[in-house]
Amino acid sequence: MKTFAVHIFAIICSSVIFFIGKSEIDNYLEKKYPVSLAVNNSNSIDHFNYLKPDVNLAISRAIKTGIPTVFGSSELSSSHLKGVCYNFFKEKNIDIQTIGHAGFQCFAISSVLAANANLLKDGKIVINLSPVWFEGKYSKGTNLECFFEYNNNFNLNEILNNTSIPIEYKKYYCKYISDKYSQINSPNAMINLLALANKNQFLYKPFVVMHKLVYEHNYKDDIQLQAFSFFQKKLSETNIRYSFKKPKINWDSLYQNAISDFKKQSTNNNVGVYNEYYTTWIKNRRPKLIEPVSDNQEFEDFKMLLLLCKQTNCRPIFTISPINTLCYSNPEAINPIMMSIMKELDKNGFKYLDLFTSNLKHYEKGVLEDIMHPGDYGWYQLDKFIMDEFSNN
């Protein structure tokens, strides 16, 4: 009884100290991290920083405040194009945030969204889908290298503790880690706990207890993680919303100028790619080959991405890029999986811009700059779709 009374006394004392000191802790965090955490002025982010959470917070802030936020892969690396969304929107004085580079596919995208699960209902989110994700080697899904580029400790900590994440998605996420656990060098306590989440809790209880103790010791008092969670909470409480009016743009003129400029830069070939690209990657080589697969992990990841969005009241719009059919010997082979993708989008009520279907039937030179990445003509069509969907007018 005496021991019990001591425990009760300790709990009461610690609670009083916490509530008395909470405002001091919050003030300390606001003073210590006003710039290094809350400000990241880049409107184009490749991947997260493993040591600093400012990039994570830039994405969270954009989602919560309704800044158009574009998720994509290698097409976002086309900084030389006037039409790529972060250049075009900046020219028009409209805020936009992009994230992604080569390899950032459905599962990695969903993990970033999951870490922001409590913010998603306010987001103006665009997800660009590339057909090549769903064929050949890319259909195996997100590799570990890319996974960890977007799942730093700040992201992992949110997924471990964010109660807004749907149970079905969290099980799927934990299965990914568990399945690839043997390939992970020096997994930390958060990785270990996530890997054990789907295991038999009776058999693995000693390991779970051990890793929880390590987590409590190493991470619960980590000032960077505390600060990140603090700012995430602040974001969830904000009522600030970004809005913009659609500018008057002569889209037809932009399209025609883009096609004309592309023709001047693709004079050494008849397959609709830039001269340099043709010389380096196409000339004297066999046509590209679409490789359909029966066991398509990327398609499963895509369906789980849609489930996550549905269950968190997230309403993204999707854009579907084409492939350059002039460079493939069997472009029609990718049609069945693309039809399945659009069927899933229709079934779940998500809006999308389909640049794939029309170009499969009759490819328009200039819509891509090579075999898969949008050129200015393609990007202007994507820009118009984003503006039409997210502007106030």
Image (cartoon, rainbow, N blue to C red):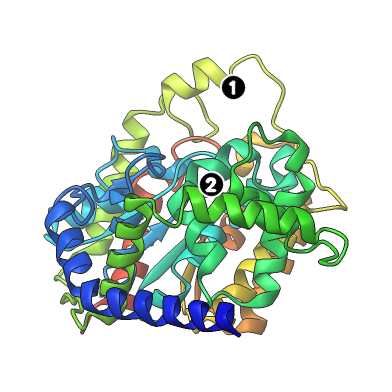
The earlier-in-sequence mark between 1 and 2 is 2
Give residue 240's position: percent from left, percent from top.
Answer: 18, 79
> Tag 1: Cα neighbours inside 10 Å, few (<14), some, or many (≥20)?
some
Image marks 1 and 2: residues in contact by CB distance under 8 Å: no
Identity of the residue drawn at 30% across and 66% down: 230
Kindly identify which residue carries mark 2: 104
> Tag 2: Cα neighbours inside 10 Å, few (<14), some, or many (≥20)?
many
Under tag 1, what secondary structure?
Answer: helix
Give residue 322's position: percent from left, percent from top.
Answer: 56, 52
Identity of the residue drawn at 63% across and 43% down: 325
Q: Residue 132 or 334: which is nearer the viewer?
A: 132
Give residue 315's position: percent from left, percent from top.
Answer: 47, 79
Count of marks placed on residues: 2
Tag shown at residue 282: 1
368 displayed left or right of 228: right
Q: Is 79 placed above or below 210 here?
A: above
Identity of the residue drawn at 44% across and 68% down: 116
